[in-house]
């Protein structure tokens, strides 16, 4: 069995191997200063688009930044900065019902920022709200085509959670309200088609104002509070991302404040689930006992930065883990993915360190057919004004606990054309795989032919009639039949031979074994003969129809120990032969021997 790697083999392969993570594609964006992603989504035209900020240290400025990248990571549709004369950040991006893109963030001189662009990155509109330097964290399109944006309204007397509702062109404010008992809102949705009420999730202040906790507010169309609730605990809590799930609940991720139970300043990744009546279903903390007592550079936090619901109805959190845990890689923090089920149980956790970096912040994640794609900030030092954006994919087999293993043929087998053989495999899975597909190649994976295009996933073997051909470069692969997400190959090549594969030579009481390699052949062939055989006549190459293509004079051959090698000549190039099967006739004074081979492109 050999796990599929799509495009790129990374320089940090040892990390991949030791944690059994399939990193398959990547794109690094690197310029002087910092390029940090905040939010990534999959678009309707099969691209990834992400937003963030781009800092030019030589210019002393920071721009909003949006990149649209083809899902194969090979083509960038656009890579643009959206600038003013102040510090700009884009925190969250969506695709609208009309197929345009809207990103929200801040412009430090102009306040909360809503930017609308077309599919080519051209600005359609750029609007600012509350010029006190406030910041928007999230935007949501309603069924009526209006928009709800949430964030922080900065105030010298304390920050306030902020909710905006705007029309489709952002020129009419339907709601503009903030609440002094809330610090920030990171999520909102409209509760009904009529737009009568909105629920917002974020951080609210504790009663004495000394800490923050997760909180919910439900407001009417005028911004008046209908219902509110805080989910307090011994540890202060901060919300970074929230979703409304397919089973009509809310799941939130973020972090806790420092935990004095283990060590001052240490904190946990937080996730909690709330039902549609706003009752707490569960609250979970993910963290480990620190193994380092002297952390000279306590950069950042262990936290969940983004949460999504996956296609198998579980939840996936992208975040980062501070260095104080067993198994870390980074000098400051590792990027991580944590997959949990609907009860909050951790199904799988993986952590990594990006190429050439000392710490990694996984800021956002999106699901694609075969993988999860992460937008991550990586850098080589402890300073946040430096770093690169790393967009990469993690194979679903790394998180979904799927293992597809081809058992036979797995390399080294010799199968005779026309025989019936048993192809065998194992499939262990916790997600749904409808069917499997088996393919084989005669040329070590250059070209593939389907053996069976649909086999029920509960079947673990298949009887195959070996095709009438010959090759010593055969390989099989087995995959899920729909999207080729899970694939395994034979570990090494196996051989298919025909009735002409073994030629028995009876001269001088010595049995001779003749072999042609490579088979299939591209531009030259080597004839191997075990034993001694005096070639006194020409070698002829015939098609299966009996047409003579070449006559090779034995002067073009050299005897080298027990190998007779055909020397290439411009007059008898094998690569000029049409694709097909051929026979070489080898003549001596007393015998004639036949040997088949295949010519391929």
Image (cartoon, grey):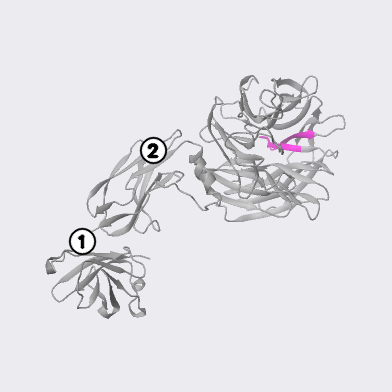
> Residue 265 falls in which quadrant of the image?
top right
Q: Position of residue 327 (x, y in %)?
A: 57, 37
As helix, strand or loop, the secondary structure at mark 2 comes to strand
Dot 2 surroundings within 10 Å: few (below 14), some, or many (20 or more)? some
Q: Nearer the viewer, residue 82 or 26?
A: 26
Asked if 398 appears above or below 387 in the picture, the reply is: above
User: Does the magenta portion include 141?
Assistant: yes
Left or right of residue 284, residue 220 in this image:
right
> Residue 437 falls in which quadrant of the image?
top left
User: Does the magenta portion include 382?
Assistant: no
Q: Quadrant of the C terminus?
A: bottom left
Q: Nearer the viewer, residue 484 or 7?
A: 7
Of the residues under marks 1 and 2, which one precedes in the sequence? 2
Q: Main secondary structure of the magenta part?
A: strand
Q: Position of residue 500 (x, y in %)?
A: 20, 62
How many dots with numbers? 2
Residue of label 2: 427
- From where the camera sits, is residue 557 visible? yes
Left or right of residue 589, residue 141 in this image:
right
Q: Nearer the viewer, residue 150 or 541?
A: 541
As helix, strand or loop, the secondary structure at mark 1 comes to loop
Asked if 418 appears above or below 570 in the picture, the reply is: above
Q: Position of residue 259 (x, y in %)?
A: 69, 25
The residue segment tinted magenta is 136-152
Label placed on residue 188:
none
Residue of label 1: 502
Asked if 358 appears above or below 244 in the picture, the reply is: below
- From where the camera sits, is residue 200 visible? no
Asked if 592 appears above or below 209 in the picture, the reply is: below
Q: CA distance from mark 1 to mark 2?
A: 37 Å
């Amino acid at each position: 069995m050999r796990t599929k790697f799509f495009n790129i083999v990374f320089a940090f392969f040892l990390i991949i191997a030791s944690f059994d993570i399939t990193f398959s594609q990547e794109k690094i964006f690197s310029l002087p200063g910092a390029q940090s992603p905040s939010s990534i989504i999959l678009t309707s035209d099969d691209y990834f688009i992400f937003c963030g900020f781009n800092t030019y240290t030589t210019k002393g400025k920071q721009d909003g930044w949006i990149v649209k990248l083809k899902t194969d990571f090979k083509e960038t549709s656009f890579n643009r900065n959206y600038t003013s004369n102040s510090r700009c950040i884009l925190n969250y991006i969506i695709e609208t019902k009309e197929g345009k893109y809207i990103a929200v963030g801040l412009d430090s001189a102009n306040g909360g920022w809503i930017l609308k662009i077309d599919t080519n990155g051209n600005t359609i509109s750029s609007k600012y709200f509350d010029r006190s330097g406030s910041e928007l964290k999230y935007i949501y399109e309603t069924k009526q085509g209006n928009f709800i944006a949430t964030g922080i309204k900065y105030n010298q007397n304390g920050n306030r959670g902020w909710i905006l509702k705007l029309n489709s062109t952002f020129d009419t404010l339907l709601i503009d309200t903030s609440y002094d008992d809330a610090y920030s809102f990171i999520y909102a949705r409209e509760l009904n088609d009529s737009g009568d009420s909105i629920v917002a999730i974020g951080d609210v202040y504790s009663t004495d104002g000394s800490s923050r906790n997760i909180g919910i507010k439900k407001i009417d169309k005028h911004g008046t509070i209908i219902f509110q609730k805080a989910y307090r605990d011994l540890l202060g809590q901060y919300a970074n991302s929230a979703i409304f799930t397919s089973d009509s609940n809310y799941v939130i991720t973020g972090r806790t404040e420092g935990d004095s139970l283990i060590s001052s300043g240490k904190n946990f990744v937080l996730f909690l689930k709330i039902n549609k009546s706003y009752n707490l279903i569960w609250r979970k903390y993910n963290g480990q006992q620190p193994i380092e007592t002297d952390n000279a550079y306590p950069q950042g936090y262990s936290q969940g930065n983004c949460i999504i619901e996956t296609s198998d109805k579980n939840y996936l959190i992208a975040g980062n883990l501070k260095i104080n845990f067993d198994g870390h890689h980074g000098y400051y923090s590792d990027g991580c993915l944590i997959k949990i089920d609907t009860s909050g149980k951790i199904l799988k956790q993986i952590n990594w360190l990006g190429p050439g970096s000392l710490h990694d912040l996984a800021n956002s994640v999106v699901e694609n057919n075969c993988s999860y794609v992460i937008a991550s900030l990586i850098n080589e030092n402890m300073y946040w004004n430096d770093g690169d954006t790393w967009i990469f994919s993690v194979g679903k087999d790394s998180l979904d606990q799927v293992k597809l293993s081809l058992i036979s043929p797995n390399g080294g087998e010799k199968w005779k054309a026309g025989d019936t053989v048993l192809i065998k495999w194992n499939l262990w899975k916790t997600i749904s795989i409808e069917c499997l597909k088996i393919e084989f190649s005669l040329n070590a994976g250059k070209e593939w032919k389907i053996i069976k295009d649909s086999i029920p996933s509960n079947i673990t073997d298949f009887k195959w009639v070996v095709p009438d051909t010959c090759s010593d470069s055969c390989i099989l692969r087995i995959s899920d039949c729909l999207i080729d997400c899970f694939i395994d190959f034979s570990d090494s090549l196996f051989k298919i031979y025909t009735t002409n594969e073994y030629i028995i030579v009876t001269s001088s009481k010595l049995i001779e074994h003749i072999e042609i390699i490579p088979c299939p052949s591209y531009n030259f062939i080597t004839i191997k003969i075990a034993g001694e055989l005096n070639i006194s006549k020409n070698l002829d190459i015939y098609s299966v129809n009996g047409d003579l293509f070449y006559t090779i004079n034995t002067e073009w051959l050299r005897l080298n120990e027990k190998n007779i090698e055909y020397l290439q000549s411009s007059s008898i190039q094998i690569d000029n032969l049409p694709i097909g099967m051929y026979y070489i006739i080898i003549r001596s004074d007393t015998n004639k021997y036949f040997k088949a081979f295949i010519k391929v492109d």
